[in-house]
Image (cartoon, rainbow, N blue to C red):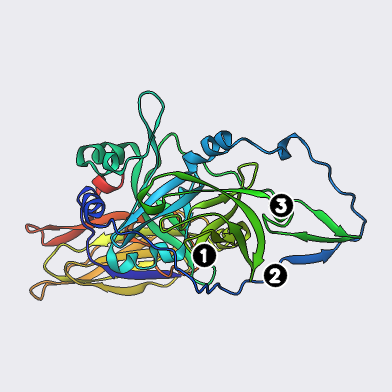
């Protein structure tokens, strides 16, 4: 199926980012009490045909020191800045450049502009730089953008019910690593009956947890806590978190992701979304092959799109100044020679120009729940080129953005 979205041309990335850091610094507050949490399903229970024996602890189950947990996880934790606030996120896939955060952190970015994501930087002595002034400095920021420590992101999946969103980054620094996940184990509760599918399923009340985020303007701050229990499907934790911790990771005593911080009463109680729901949202991602065409001509152009040999030509219209997003969904690989675009007529002073079909290169990106159309930033970009001598229009690749 081919979808099309017409949107205005995006502003220059570096200018947008600098404005974002200068004026988009209000704190993203975690809602105060009274608490309202989404109703999530209870843990899955099943009966196995054989009787299980409890699995003894092994070396990998041993508790790690705070320093080791922090240094192990910090390359995965990011600072998220939007025009309306600041928050946290955690890198979950380096190959696809995916970060998970809260839905409420990025919910208004379609209306209020870009999402800026910043990874932590160390100085020449290896010390982590936590001062916001370093990252807000214009000259530093341009270098960080080039190296991938600062990058623009777009939402590729979202679920307001679980308060989760997955964003795709345009760049990634060499030092980045994906967070370690809790590996769900089968643990016997009674004869043959087990609880599985949640990172906290085997956690006892009082078990140590660790929260890393960017609260109250303090970057990459570690907060200690302990597991209290479940509250309507959420993980309830005793830990002092504040605005800016939203979207940050909650880790167990082995430094593995068990949840995403989402709510706090700004005292000692914090609620987190279990990592199982991160997995569920990831599972909704599917490949979409995307191209875009910018119409910078003073004419409305009618064209047709075809996604496969046995497909039908579909007519589309693009007005002057618009950008057409061409998206083929539901296919891991596009057949050779497609997408095809045919321009039958160009409304320019009553003249009609016929053009042969063009084969468009595409970028393959993954999008999931809650994202109907593909962001322009993910597309392989083309633009119209008009030859006044022959009065014909052709397509050219926008090489600057396709590198």
The local secondary structure at tag 2 comes to loop
Q: Which residue does the numbered mark 2 point to in the structure image?
A: 42
Is 381 in front, or is 313? 381
The local secondary structure at tag 1 comes to loop
Query: Of the residues tagged 3 and 2, which is closer to the observer?
Result: 2
Which residue is found at the position 43% from the left and 34% from the top? 174
Q: Are marks 3 and 2 in contact (CB under 8 Å)?
A: no
Q: Is residue 188 left or right of residue 331?
A: right
Question: Going from the N terminus, do you reach mark 1 or mark 3 first?
Answer: 3
Q: Is residue 170 left or right of residue 370?
A: left
Is 40 in front, or is 379? 40
Q: Which residue does the numbered mark 1 point to in the structure image?
A: 330
Residue 55 in the image: x percent, y percent?
84, 45
Query: Of the residues tagged 1 and 3, which is closer to the observer?
Result: 3
The answer to which quarter of the image holds residue 392 is bottom left
The answer to which quarter of the image holds residue 280 is bottom right
**Badge 2, how many Cα within 10 Å: few under 14, some, many 20+?**
few
Is residue 122 placed above or below 26 in the rendered structure? above
Residue 27 in the image: x percent, y percent?
34, 59
Is 336 in front, or is 200? 200
Question: Going from the N terminus, do you reach mark 3 or mark 2 first?
Answer: 2
């Amino acid at each position: 199926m081919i979808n099309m979205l017409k949107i205005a041309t995006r502003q220059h990335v570096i200018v947008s980012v600098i404005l974002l850091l200068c004026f988009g610094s209000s704190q993203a507050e975690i809602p105060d009490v009274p608490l309202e949490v989404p109703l999530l399903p209870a843990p899955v229970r099943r009966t196995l045909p054989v009787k299980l024996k409890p699995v003894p602890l092994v070396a990998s189950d041993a508790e790690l020191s705070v320093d080791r947990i922090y240094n192990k996880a910090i390359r995965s934790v990011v600072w998220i800045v939007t025009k309306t606030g600041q928050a946290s996120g955690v890198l979950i896939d380096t190959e696809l450049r995916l970060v998970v955060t809260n839905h409420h952190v990025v919910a208004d970015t379609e209306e209020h502009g870009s999402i800026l994501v910043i990874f932590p930087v160390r100085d020449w002595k290896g010390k982590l730089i936590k001062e916001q002034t370093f990252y807000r400095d214009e000259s530093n920021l341009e270098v960080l953008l080039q190296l991938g420590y600062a990058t623009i992101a777009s939402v590729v999946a979202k679920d307001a019910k679980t308060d989760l969103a997955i964003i795709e980054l345009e760049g990634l620094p060499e030092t980045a690593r994906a967070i370690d996940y809790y590996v769900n184990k089968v643990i016997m509760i009674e004869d043959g009956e087990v609880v599985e599918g949640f990172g906290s399923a085997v956690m006892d009340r009082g078990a140590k947890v660790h929260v890393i985020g960017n609260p109250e303007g303090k970057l990459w701050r570690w907060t200690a806590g302990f597991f209290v229990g479940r509250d309507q499907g959420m993980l309830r934790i005793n830990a002092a978190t504040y605005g800016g911790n939203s979207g940050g990771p909650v880790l167990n005593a082995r430094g593995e992701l068990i949840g995403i911080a989402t709510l706090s009463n700004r005292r000692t109680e914090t609620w987190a979304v279990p990592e199982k729901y991160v997995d569920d949202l990831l599972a909704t991602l599917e490949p979409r092959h995307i191209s875009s065409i910018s119409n910078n001509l003073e004419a409305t152009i009618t064209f047709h799109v075809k996604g496969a040999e046995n497909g039908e030509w579909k007519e589309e219209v693009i007005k002057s100044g618009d950008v057409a997003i061409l998206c083929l969904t539901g296919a891991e690989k596009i057949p050779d020679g497609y997408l095809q675009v045919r321009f039958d007529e160009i409304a320019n002073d009553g003249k009609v120009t016929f053009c042969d079909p063009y084969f468009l290169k595409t970028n393959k990106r993954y999008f999931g729940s809650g994202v109907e159309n593909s962001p322009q930033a993910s597309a392989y970009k083309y633009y119209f080129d008009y030859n006044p001598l022959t009065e014909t229009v052709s397509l050219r690749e926008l090489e600057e953005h396709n590198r």
